[in-house]
Image (tube, grey):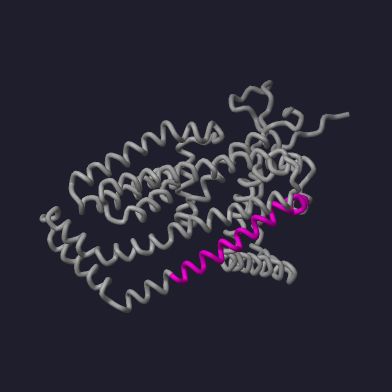
Amino acid sequence: MGTPPIEPSVLTSPPNGDPLAPPLAAPLAPPLAAPIAAPSSVRHDVSARTVVKVVAVTALTIGGLWLVLKLATILLLLFVAFLLTAALDPIAGRLERRGLPRPVSVGLLALALVAVVTLLLLLLIPPLIDQGAQFGDQLPSYIDRAKGLSRGNPALVDRLRAAAGSGSASPTVLLGGALAIGAGVVKGVSDLVILLVMTVYLLVDGERSYGWAVHFLPPKQRANVRRALPEISRVVSGYLIGQVATSLLFGVFAYLLLWTEHVPQPLLLAVAAAVLDAIPVAGVLLATAPAALLALTVSPQAAAIVLGGYVIYHQLESHVLVPRIYAGRLRISSFAVLVAALVGWTLLGVVGVLLALPVAAAIPVIEQIWREEPGAAS
């Protein structure tokens, strides 16, 4: 057979003309470009059911927020009732272990609370009203006494005197203030009654309420909640009892100091000091400033004594009384206390600060129990 002829379009001669050299392949033609597809529009079909779901979720969210705002007072009272229940449950438990039935123990505890609150109101409210009225009447004279100490800014003193004089002499202002105070007293008493009823109900029927609340949780979480509740109750109870003790001590000290130095309205300032003692960081400043200013109307020496006494007592309370009263029940740092106070102030003001601290004190207990294995605790 003969050799087929070589197509010149397939092979080419070597560039050096050597007939023995392998022929070179012809260059390949460039590939054809793929045709460009025309842009197509993407269509998203949204079903009517999806639209209804989105609208329903949005409406429920807005409605839930509106409902929370409308029920804010009741929710706040319920939260305070839970805190009081956690604080009083150990005391009711001790009475129950002494042989008293649970309802009887709770009833005696409620009667004792009502008696203490009523006694305090009867002892404090009338003199507080009298001293508050005296403060309003004598405010212009207090400003006049301070005029000699404010010679650098006489215009400020004149404006303060004019405002104080117009406020104390205007019948409209007096009537409005009296109505506001009366409405506040009525609302406060009604809130106290509602709070007491909620607390008594939770103390008596708390086990059934607890069972209803936790049956939605998985079994492991129920066990953690069951272990956490006694510790939370112990911590909250220790905090509230300790805070009441430190506030009472500070109030008694403030009253004796102010009465000794003949500072006007000593009971009013002492009650304010006892309440403000529960506010961390800023409480001592808010309690000291008005006491020192009113003492300044007596004499600079009295103001210096009051200021020094408040500062020394605060140091004594922080380094001696608080460690002994709380006795290691609270495992929370000063920075956490500050953050909790700021969060509470942002949400609810002074009431938020008072409520945020026991919650912050209970967080380390909850964290420790939740991080432990179920079989680790013995």
Residue 252 pos. (x, y %) = 40, 45
**Camera-side residue of 378 and 131:** 131
Q: Could you tell me which quadrant the C terminus lies in?
A: top right
Q: Which residue is drawn at 53% across and 56% down?
A: 117
In this view of the protein, can residue 257 be seen by the observer? yes
Residue 334 pos. (x, y %) = 45, 37
Q: Could you tell me which quadrant the N terminus lies in?
A: top right
The image quarter containing residue 143 is bottom left
Picture layout, residue 262 above or below residue 66: above
Q: Is residue 188 magenta?
A: yes
Residue 32 pos. (x, y %) = 66, 49
Identify the main secondary structure in magenta. Answer: helix
Q: Does the magenta stretch include residue 173?
A: no
| Furthest residue toward top | 20
Picture layout, residue 311 above or below residue 82: above
Q: Residue at x 61, y 67 (%)?
A: 67
